[in-house]
Image: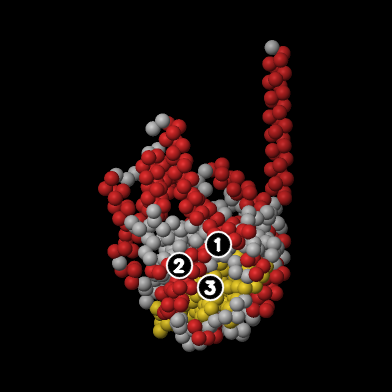
C-alpha cells in the first residue's frame, strides 16, 4: 500500500515539476520573442490622417490616394517619411489589409489543418523569427510599424499586429523553404538589342506564388515617392511593403525567383525587403549588388536585375551562406528556380534541384519559346508568359508545374525600363488584359483624375478564357480542391461513377487528375483503385522526379495496407 502511495506521490511530484518547467519555458519563450517597437517619428500619429472617399472605391489622404481601376486592380500612391508612409498606407487600405489577412490565415489553416500541428508551427515561427528585427533596416521596420497600426485586432491571438505583419513579410521565404507546400515556382527572362523588337531592354516574369484564389483577388499596384531614395512601383497585395516585382524611376527593375533552400536555422532579412531596398536605393547594377552583399537572408533566391543605365540584366544569386552574380554579358537572360553562376555550379543542393525539380524543364521550355519568337515585343512576351504547353508544344495537361503558365500565378509583369513603361496582368492568372503604366507620369501625378493606366497600351485577354477547356479547368480545380479538403481536413465529399468520369474529362491529359483520384480512393480505403490511379498518373507527363517519387511512395503505402489487411 505504501509503495502505491509513494508511486502516486512521485507521479504527482513529477507532474508538478513538469508543469513548473513548462510554465518557466513559456515565460522564457514569451520574453525571448518579444518584439521592441522601432524608433518612430512623434510628429506623425494615426489620428491625424483621415481618409476621404471622393468616389466609389477611390480614397485620398492628403496627396496620397487609393483607387480601384476598371479591371479590378487596386492602385495606391504614397509619399513622405517612413513612419508617415506606413500610417497612410494602413489608413488608405485598412479593409484590403484585413481581407488579405483573413485569406492568408484561412489558407494556412487549410495547408496545416491539424490544430496541434498549427500550434506547434506558430510556436516554431515565433521562435524562428524572434530576432528578425535585427536584420531588417530601421526604415523598413518603421514603415511596417506604421502599417500595423491599421491591422485588425481579430488575429491578436496569433501575435500582436506589428509582429504579425513583420512575419507576413517573410511568407514568400517560408513558402519556398517549405518546398513541399509548392507555394513558389517562378519563371522570368530578359532580352535586349537584337533579340528585342525595338532593340531596347525588355524584362518579363510570372510570379507563381499561390496562397489560394481568394488571396489573389485584390491585387495592388503600389507607387511610392519616399523621402529618401528613388520613386518606384511594385505589384503584389495589400499589407506588403516589400517587393516581389517592381521598377524604379531610374529604370532599374527587380523580380524574385525562389531557388532550392536547405532548412534555415534562423530568420534574417526577408527577401522581399531586400528587393525593396535595392529598388529604392539602387540606380544601377553595381549599386544593387552592393546592397545585396551587405544583407543576410535565410533562404536561397535569384534576383533578376534589369538596368536602364547599364543597358542589360544580371541575376544576383544569393543563399544564406554565399552569393554570386550571373552575368552572361549576352542579350538573353533566362531565370527559373535554379542557379547558374560559377559559385553554385557544383553546389550539391543546386545540382539536386536541377535534377529533381521542374525548374530546368521550364528553363528549357522558356528558352525554346524565345528562340521561336525573336525578336520579342510586348505582345510576344505576354504570349510566352501565358504558354500552357510542354517542350515542342506537347500538351501536358492544364496546371502542370512544367508549364510556363501553371494557371496559379498571382501575377505576371513586363517592363520596358528605358521607356519607364510596365504592363501588369489582370485576373484570372495571366489570362486577363495586360494594362500598361508610365511610372514617371504616375509619380508626377499627371494621370490621377482619369485612368492611371494608359488605354492605348492595353493587351487583350488570352483566347483560352473563352474556350470550353477553360470552363472545364475551372471545374477541375474546384473538384480537386474538394478532394484535397477531404484528404487533409476530413470535410465530407464523394464522387459517384458518373462524376468521377466527368472529373477525368475536365483535364484528361494531366497526371494531377489521376494522382488526385488516387489520393481520394486512398482516403476512402479503396487501395486497389488508388494504386490503379496512381499508376495511371505515372503514365502521363509528371512534373518532376520529386513528384514521381511521391507517387511511387503512395503506391507502396497502399500496397502495404493491402498486404496488412489481406485484401
Q: Earlier in the sequence, mark 3 or mark 1?
A: 3
Considering the numbered disc 3 on the image, is that residue within a helix, a strand or a loop? Answer: strand
Q: Nearer the viewer, residue 138 or 523?
A: 523
Task: Name the image quarter holding the C terminus.
Answer: top left
| Residue name at image x 51 percent, y 54 percent | 546
Considering the numbered disc 2 on the image, is that residue within a helix, a strand or a loop? Answer: loop
Q: Assess disc 2: are there few (<14), some (14-19) or many (≥20) residues with their C-alpha within 10 Å of its C-alpha.
A: many
Specify whether residue 506 is in view. Answer: yes
Please say if 487 is above or below 99.
Answer: above
Percent position of residue 128, x then y: 66, 53
Residue at the spot of label 3: 334
Residue at mark 3 to residue at mark 2: CA–CA distance = 12 Å
Q: Assess disc 3: are there few (<14), some (14-19) or many (≥20) residues with their C-alpha within 10 Å of its C-alpha.
A: many
Residue at the spot of label 2: 404
Q: Nearer the viewer, residue 301 or 274?
A: 301
Residue at the spot of label 1: 354
Specify whether residue 412 is in view. Answer: no
Amino acid at each position: 500500500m505504501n509503495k502505491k502511495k509513494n508511486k502516486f506521490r512521485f507521479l504527482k511530484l513529477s507532474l508538478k515539476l513538469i508543469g513548473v518547467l513548462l510554465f518557466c519555458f513559456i515565460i522564457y519563450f514569451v520574453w525571448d520573442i518579444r518584439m521592441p517597437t522601432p524608433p518612430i517619428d512623434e510628429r506623425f500619429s494615426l489620428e491625424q490622417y483621415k481618409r476621404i472617399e471622393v468616389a466609389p472605391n477611390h480614397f485620398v489622404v492628403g496627396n496620397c490616394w487609393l483607387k480601384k481601376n476598371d479591371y479590378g486592380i487596386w492602385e495606391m500612391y504614397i509619399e513622405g517619411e517612413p513612419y508617415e508612409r506606413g500610417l497612410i498606407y494602413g489608413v488608405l487600405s485598412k479593409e484590403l489589409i484585413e481581407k488579405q489577412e483573413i485569406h492568408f490565415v484561412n489558407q494556412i489553416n487549410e495547408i496545416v489543418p491539424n490544430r496541434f500541428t498549427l500550434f506547434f508551427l506558430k510556436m516554431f515561427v515565433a521562435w524562428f523569427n524572434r530576432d528578425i528585427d535585427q536584420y531588417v533596416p530601421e526604415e523598413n521596420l518603421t514603415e511596417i510599424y506604421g502599417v500595423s497600426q491599421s491591422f485588425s485586432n481579430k488575429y491578436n491571438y496569433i501575435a500582436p499586429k506589428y509582429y504579425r505583419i513583420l512575419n507576413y513579410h517573410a511568407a514568400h521565404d517560408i513558402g519556398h523553404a517549405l518546398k513541399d507546400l509548392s507555394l513558389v515556382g517562378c519563371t522570368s527572362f530578359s532580352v535586349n538589342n537584337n533579340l528585342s523588337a525595338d532593340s531596347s531592354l525588355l524584362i518579363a516574369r510570372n510570379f507563381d506564388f499561390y496562397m489560394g484564389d481568394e488571396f489573389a483577388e485584390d491585387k495592388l499596384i503600389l507607387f511610392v515617392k519616399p523621402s529618401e531614395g528613388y520613386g518606384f512601383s511594385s505589384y503584389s497585395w495589400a499589407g506588403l511593403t516589400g517587393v516581389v516585382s517592381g521598377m524604379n524611376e531610374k529604370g532599374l527593375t527587380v523580380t524574385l525567383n525562389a531557388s532550392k533552400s536547405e532548412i534555415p536555422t534562423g530568420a534574417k532579412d526577408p527577401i522581399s525587403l531586400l528587393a525593396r531596398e535595392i529598388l529604392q536605393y539602387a540606380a544601377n547594377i553595381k549599386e544593387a549588388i552592393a546592397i545585396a552583399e551587405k544583407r543576410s537572408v535565410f533562404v536561397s533566391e535569384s534576383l533578376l536585375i534589369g538596368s536602364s543605365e547599364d543597358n542589360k540584366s544580371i541575376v544576383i544569386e544569393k543563399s544564406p551562406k554565399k552569393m554570386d552574380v550571373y552575368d552572361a554579358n549576352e542579350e538573353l537572360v533566362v531565370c527559373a528556380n535554379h542557379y547558374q553562376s560559377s559559385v553554385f555550379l557544383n553546389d550539391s543542393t543546386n545540382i539536386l534541384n536541377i535534377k529533381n525539380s521542374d525548374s530546368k524543364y521550364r528553363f528549357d521550355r522558356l528558352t525554346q519559346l524565345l528562340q521561336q519568337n525573336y525578336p520579342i515585343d510586348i505582345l510576344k512576351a505576354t504570349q510566352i508568359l501565358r504558354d500552357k504547353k510542354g517542350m515542342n508544344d506537347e500538351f501536358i495537361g492544364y496546371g502542370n508545374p512544367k508549364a510556363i503558365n501553371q494557371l496559379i500565378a498571382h501575377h505576371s509583369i513586363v517592363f520596358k525600363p528605358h521607356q519607364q513603361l510596365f504592363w501588369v496582368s489582370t485576373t484570372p492568372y495571366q489570362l486577363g488584359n495586360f494594362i500598361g503604366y508610365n511610372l514617371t507620369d504616375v509619380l508626377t501625378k499627371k494621370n490621377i483624375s482619369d485612368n492611371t493606366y494608359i488605354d492605348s497600351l492595353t493587351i487583350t485577354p488570352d483566347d483560352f478564357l473563352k474556350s470550353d477547356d477553360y470552363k472545364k479547368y475551372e471545374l477541375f480545380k474546384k473538384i480537386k480542391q474538394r478532394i484535397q479538403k477531404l484528404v487533409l481536413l476530413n470535410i465530407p465529399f464523394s464522387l459517384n461513377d458518373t462524376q468521377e468520369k466527368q472529373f477525368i474529362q475536365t483535364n484528361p491529359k494531366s497526371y494531377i487528375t489521376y494522382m488526385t483520384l488516387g489520393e481520394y480512393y486512398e482516403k476512402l480505403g479503396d487501395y486497389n483503385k488508388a494504386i490503379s490511379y496512381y499508376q495511371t498518373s505515372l503514365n502521363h507527363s509528371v512534373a518532376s522526379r520529386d513528384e514521381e517519387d511521391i507517387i511511387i511512395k503512395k503506391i507502396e503505402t497502399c500496397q502495404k495496407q493491402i498486404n496488412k489487411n489481406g485484401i
